[in-house]
Image (spheres, rainbow, N blue to C red):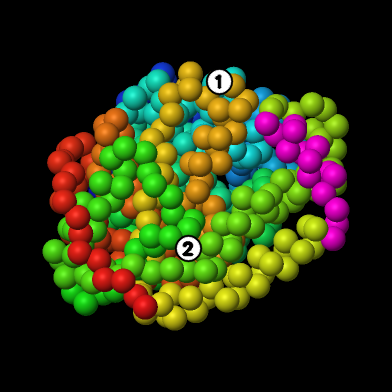
């Protein structure tokens, strides 16, 4: 059998495996078509037969969030109306993955303009949490996380403006990496906030994520020994008490890392508290989105949008320019100061539970008031990271009292993405928990407080 024949059979097997893994009832995809997957495979096989290189990601199944252009599919930005043609061609990161040979499985569900983070709209439209279909899966890269759980996608492209990759990764029990803002070009991606938007990937494990980043040509560092590494545990604002079982699962993960030789140090991070205050006071996102819609998608802006987006746009339109400018200056100052914050506290990385919230049931967030409270709380451990302009990664770390996944978030200043992934790979190998295997939570880790 020739190498070309082997490559073709491998691609066909991967294509059919992706199709067979899809769970329609979970609603991961806004657009899904087995026929298109088979057409992609056939076209790629022809290219290889004619002498083209297969590519480092040949046949790797990749889902794309419905806020990024994907040639041959119709991007709607989380809505039900196609966006203008400018958004209907490959986004820059999609084109890069295509050149590497990726197999695109479709556009994954997100809420309109990626604005909220529960993964469903106020009227309950959106993917199910694969671990309990009565509960939300987190968002706004909601379908991205579900596509990885079901196995239709080995990698999922997502975006993160205030936790939109890390939160669904945590609630669905997968790995989610948020890169620093601008690390990958956002060209061809529908913007939410140009100051805070970042791209990233979701995968079933840190090891899988690292291997595929390496294949894509990203720098890869060996997973370090945890012996002597200083892990900073934030036990002050913006950290809040988690729902039952979350803090216990987090504490178990800390004990595992401590057993592997890491040193746990409690820290205070004033910049984190300031970033959280800015985020919760209104931040930049709604104003940035309102300005973008007014300038570039006026037809969408001038019609009633779905709640709570419509209310947010009205408030953003009334925001004085001076107040917006003040917030922007504050954010830039925080990003500058926070770049050396970990060094000042004497730790290598910041650790927190990814979110303090057990994924609520859909019937629990059916009212506007309940939806707003849950939407704010689900981002409490994630949103401030974007305002500091850090990179961050969430990996599975246990189950909460409801039996739902708990995420362990690692964060450090942008520019240290390779170091973050390597450290997360070492942590993953040291955790007693593995997805699908519940464990008992008990006891307390020994943590040293800084002065």
Which tag, 2 or 1, sits closer to the chain's start? 1
Q: Which residue is mark 2?
A: 391
The CA span between labels 2 and 1 is 33 Å
Residue at image position (20%, 59%) is 445
Q: Secondary structure at mark 2?
A: strand
Q: Indicate the quadrant containing the N terminus: top left, top right, bottom left or bottom right.
A: top left
Residue at image position (72%, 61%) is 327
Image coords of residue 58 (percent x, y): 38, 49
Against 366, is 182 above or below? below
- On the image, which quarter does residue 42 sit in? top left
Q: Which residues are magenta?
A: 308-322
Q: Residues within 10 Å of mark 1 (few under 14, many from 20)?
A: some
Q: Secondary structure at mark 1?
A: loop
Judge left or right: residue 54 versus residue 183: left
Does residue 345 show up?
yes
Q: Is most of the magenta stretch helix, strand or loop?
A: helix
Residue at image position (65%, 72%) is 333
Q: Indicate the quadrant containing the C terminus: top left, top right, bottom left or bottom right.
A: bottom left
Image coords of residue 9 (percent x, y): 29, 39
- Camera-side residue of 111 and 7: 111
- Camera-side residue of 356 and 38: 356
Is residue 59 one of those drawn in magenta?
no
Against 120, is 237 above or below? below
Residue at image position (60%, 44%) is 68
Does residue 16 show up?
no
- On the image, which quarter does residue 301 sit in? top right
Judge left or right: residue 61 versus residue 253: right
Q: Which residue is mark 1?
A: 366
Q: Residues within 10 Å of mark 2 (few under 14, many from 20)?
A: many
- On the image, which quarter does residue 406 sit in? top left
Image coords of residue 432 (percent x, y): 15, 51
Given contact means CB atoms under 8 Å apart, are the residues at marks 2 and 1 in contact? no
């Amino acid at each position: 059998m020739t190498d070309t024949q082997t490559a073709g059979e491998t691609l066909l097997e991967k294509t059919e495996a992706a199709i067979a893994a899809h769970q329609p009832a979970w609603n991961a995809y806004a657009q899904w078509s087995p026929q298109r997957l088979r057409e992609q495979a056939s076209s790629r096989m022809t290219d290889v037969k004619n002498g083209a290189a297969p590519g480092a990601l040949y046949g790797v199944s990749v889902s794309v969030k419905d806020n990024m252009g994907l040639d041959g599919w119709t991007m709607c930005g989380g809505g039900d109306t196609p966006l203008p043609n400018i958004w209907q061609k490959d986004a820059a990161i999609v084109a890069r993955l295509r050149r590497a040979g990726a197999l695109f499985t479709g556009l994954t569900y997100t809420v309109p303009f990626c604005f909220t983070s529960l993964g469903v709209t106020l009227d309950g439209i959106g993917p199910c949490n694969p671990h309990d279909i009565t509960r939300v899966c987190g968002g706004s890269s909601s379908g991205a996380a579900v596509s990885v759980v079901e196995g239709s996608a080995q990698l999922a492209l997502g975006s993160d403006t205030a936790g939109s990759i890390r939160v669904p990764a945590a609630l669905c029990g997968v790995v989610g990496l948020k890169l620093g803002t601008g690390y990958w070009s956002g060209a061809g991606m529908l913007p939410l906030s140009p100051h805070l938007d970042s791209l990233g990937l979701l995968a079933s494990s840190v090891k899988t994520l690292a291997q595929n980043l390496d294949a894509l040509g990203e720098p890869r560092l060996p997973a370090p020994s945890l012996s002597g590494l200083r892990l900073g545990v934030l036990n002050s604002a913006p950290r809040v008490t988690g729902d039952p079982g979350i803090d216990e699962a987090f504490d178990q993960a800390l004990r595992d890392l401590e057993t592997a030789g890491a040193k746990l140090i409690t820290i205070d991070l004033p910049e984190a508290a300031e970033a959280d205050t800015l985020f919760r006071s209104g931040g930049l996102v709604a104003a940035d989105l309102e300005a973008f819609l007014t300038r570039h998608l006026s037809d969408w802006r001038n019609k009633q949008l779905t709640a709570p987006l419509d209310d947010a746009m009205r408030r953003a339109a009334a925001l004085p320019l001076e107040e917006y400018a003040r917030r922007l200056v504050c954010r830039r100052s925080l990003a500058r100061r926070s770049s050396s914050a970990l060094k000042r506290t004497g730790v290598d990385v910041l650790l927190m539970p990814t979110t303090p919230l057990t994924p609520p049931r859909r019937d629990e967030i059916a009212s506007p008031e309940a939806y707003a409270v849950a939407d704010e709380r689900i981002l409490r451990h994630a949103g401030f990271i974007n305002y500091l302009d850090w990179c961050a990664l969430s990996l599975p770390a246990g189950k909460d009292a409801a039996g739902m996944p708990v995420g362990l978030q690692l964060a450090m200043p942008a520019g240290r993405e390779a170091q973050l992934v390597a450290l997360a790979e070492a942590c993953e190998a040291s955790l007693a928990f593995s997805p699908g295997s519940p464990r008992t939570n008990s006891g307390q880790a020994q943590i040293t407080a800084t002065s």
